[in-house]
Image: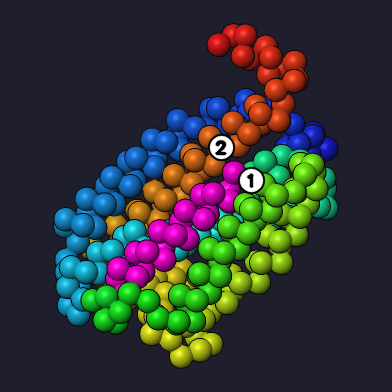
Amino acid sequence: MKTLYHRLGSPKWFYQITGTWLPWFAAASVLLLASGLIWGLAYAPMDYQQGNSFRIIYIHVPAALLAQSVYMMMAIAGVVLLVWKIKMADVVAQSLAPVGASMTFIALVTGAIWGVPTWGTWWMWDARLTSMLILFFLYLGVMALREALKPQEVAAKACAVLAIVGVINIPIIKYSVDWWYTLHQPATFTLTEKPAMPASMWVPLLIMVLGFYAFLGWSVLLRARSEVLKREQKSGWVKELLQRK
């Protein structure tokens, strides 16, 4: 356990081990996203109520899931940084924030587009939409705080605290459709209930969700590896690595 603890806190070990993971995440994301999109957009049957407009679900739902998952990952990384002082947790948190903000933005935009044929409007101060907008502002706040504060250690702790405090918004997003009157539909499918959609519709959605998570792994690892090199540029192993290249 002690060995694992030291490895998790080692930038050199992180950089080396993640180099072997990158091709797998990249290949998985390409294969899953391509197959999920083709199946969902071209071969899945039309919805009996929404027609073809429902197909935006194959982008909207995975993006919304990632938006929430990434913020929870940031909060966990914040706890690890503050409690166990593992600086690599801050590297991961910093790499997660832009991806999470992008996914939240995609979820908001695709939700607005979907709202036109469904609700007859681009935007409504619905409980789910409003809490997702708050999540987007939380992401922007974390990124702005990191740029505004110096030195790096102070910014890392401040971002960790904001991420931990802001995580209270995640259950609000998840249960908003149950707690308040809302036009937003309930969860498309859950692990505990039988999907309301036929398999020909929800299987490509599941593939897209997996593809989005594979893309998350690939993009975050790329960002984290780049940040490790930036922070450790004066270290001997980084200088040796750059000389080889």
Quarter occupied by the C terminus:
top right
Side of 159 relative to 192 (left or right): right
Side of 46 relative to 151 (left or right): left
Element type where label 1 sits in the image: helix
Image location of residue 87, percent across then percent down: 76, 40
Image location of residue 58, percent across then percent down: 31, 60
Q: Quadrant of residue 90?
A: top right
Distance from disc 2 to disc 1, alpha carbons, whole Å, reads 9 Å
Q: Main secondary structure of the magenta part?
A: helix
In the displayed structure, 233 sits above or below 136; it is above
Question: Which residue is labeled 2 in the image?
Answer: 223
Q: Residue at x 53, y 63 (%)?
A: 136
Amino acid beneath label 1: Gln
On whether residue 107 falls in the magenta region, the answer is yes
121 or 59: nearer the eye? 121
- The answer to whether residue 196 of the structure is visible from this angle is yes
On whether residue 139 falls in the magenta region, the answer is no
Q: Which mark is residue 137?
A: none
Q: Which residues are magenta?
A: 94-115
Question: Which residue is labeled 1 in the image?
Answer: 94
Q: Are the residues at dot 2 and dot 1 in contact (C-beta closer than 8 Å)?
A: yes
